[in-house]
Amino acid sequence: MRQVIIIGSGPAGYTAAIYAARAGLAPLVIASSVEAGGELMNTTDVENYPGFPEGVQGPDLMMSFEAQAERFGAEILLDDVTSVELEGPVKKVTLGSGEVVEALAVIVATGSAYRKLGLADEERLTGRGVSWCATCDGFFFKEKTIAVVGGGDSAMEEATFLTRFADKVYVIYRGDTLRASLTMQQRAFDNEKIEFIWNSQVTAINGEESVTGITVHNSATGEDSTLEVQGLFIAIGSDPRTALVSGQIDLSDDGTIAVEGRTSKTSLTGVFAAGDVTDPTYRQAVTAAGTGCVAALDAEHYLATLPAETIAQTQGPAAPEEKELVTS
Amino acid sequence: MSNVKAVTDASFENDVLKSEKTILVDFWAEWCGPCRAVGPILDQISVEHSDKIEIVKLNVDDNPQTAAKYQITSIPAMKVYQGGEVVKTVIGAKPKPQLVAELAEFLA
């Protein structure tokens, strides 16, 4: 049995791991088999994470988080959690491998999942022109015409990034004022390859073998029009990933895990939550990291209230030896 | 590093299309994070099911002709070939149990 298990490996999960490891809790981080490092692994330039005046590449940032957590004795497992039993004093976490690991405390930092448009042909044409990852797939759209749906920072970043490859990038947004930060907006407005289509929603994706176009409905004029595009990148936000824990801990009306005030305490004793899965509003790497820290401190305080004989049943050294920092 | 064989534009016909075996081609690139994540999982499947399927990888940067021919627009893309034809396509990095389930008919 562990003192604490952390589910998730984005900025919240790894920050929780750094603090928990430094507190001598020898945390086990279940980092996911194919999404370790979280959303920033598919991001290029991160320009707003403090401490990096020149910016930093998303994957580099997350590998630094990971190295820092490991340095203090966090154990990182590249596996997925398939189910959890969070009630009672001993929490059970089942892994993709079938193994069940137990802990006295669990920190849920499962982040969020990309939102879909909900159109009939979206699934069928995924990988045939429909994409959620500009950094993965932009390369295949050299000299092509692309549409990006969305008006937030990630939509602006994707549109700007895609102009490296595409001849033309439409940004389709349902409103007439973007949600993106001013810097990101301005960068997109200044880019000659980007054309904005306001007050509009994608209502159909056309194409048999691959995407050939989209149908767009303008809510201001009531008109439908067709755009010839070979690619459609969807960046309309994300929803908190709560499937694992819903039914066991309370969720807020907005779908995030409910936490008590500015703490990370969920409705179940010994279960803490941090990062985007708790955050309907800010959803930044730095806010996620901040709440990851909160969760580790809350878990540490909780574990300190447990009887010494309970803690004695857990594995992991009380004060782990500091490892050499491996930099790549 | 990966233990699966790399195929190229030049070798694709012989290694994949003319092969008598069931071949899974992993279309990937260095700059694709999800590709790097799914690579080790494909390595494992390759070892565990070597009697049923041969897994190879094709770098789309170095081999644009084959990537274009099969209209790859999203990676990782995993295509299963039998007798020179694509019989199954899986798009995106997925956890091992899910990937094994999707490929079940070729692994059993």
Image (cartoon, coloured by chain):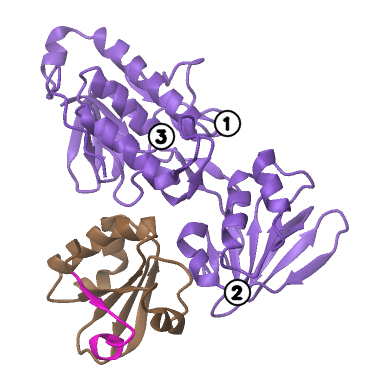
Q: Amino acid at mark 1?
A: Tyr
Residue B7 forms part of the magenta stretch: yes
Q: Amino acid at mark 2?
A: Glu
Disc 1, SS: loop
For the magenta stretch, what is the residue range?
Answer: B4-16
Q: Which residue is mark 1?
A: A282
Disc 3, SS: helix
Q: Which residue is mark 3?
A: A11
Q: In the rendered image of this protein, does residue B72 appear above or below residue A235?
A: below
User: Neighbour class for label 3 at 10 Å: few (<14), some, many (≥20)?
Assistant: many
In the image, A11: left or right of A71?
A: right
Q: Is residue A66 visible?
A: yes
Q: In the rendered image of this protein, does residue A169 appear above or below residue A279?
A: below
Disc 2, SS: loop
Q: Are marks 1 and 2 in contact (CB under 8 Å)?
A: no
Q: Chain of mark 2?
A: A
Corner quadrant of residue B105:
bottom left
What is the drawing colour of chain B? brown
Chain purple in the figure, letter: A
Q: Earlier in the sequence, mark 3 or mark 2?
A: 3
Q: Which residue is mark 2?
A: A143
Q: Are marks 1 and 2 on the same chain?
A: yes
**Quadrant occupied by the C terminus of chain B:** bottom left
Q: Chain of mark 3?
A: A
In the image, B94: left or right of A157?
A: left
Residue A36 forms part of the magenta stretch: no
Residue found 39% across the figure and 60% down from its top: B31
How far apart are the alpha carbons under marks 1 and 2?
Answer: 35 Å
Corner quadrant of residue A14:
top left
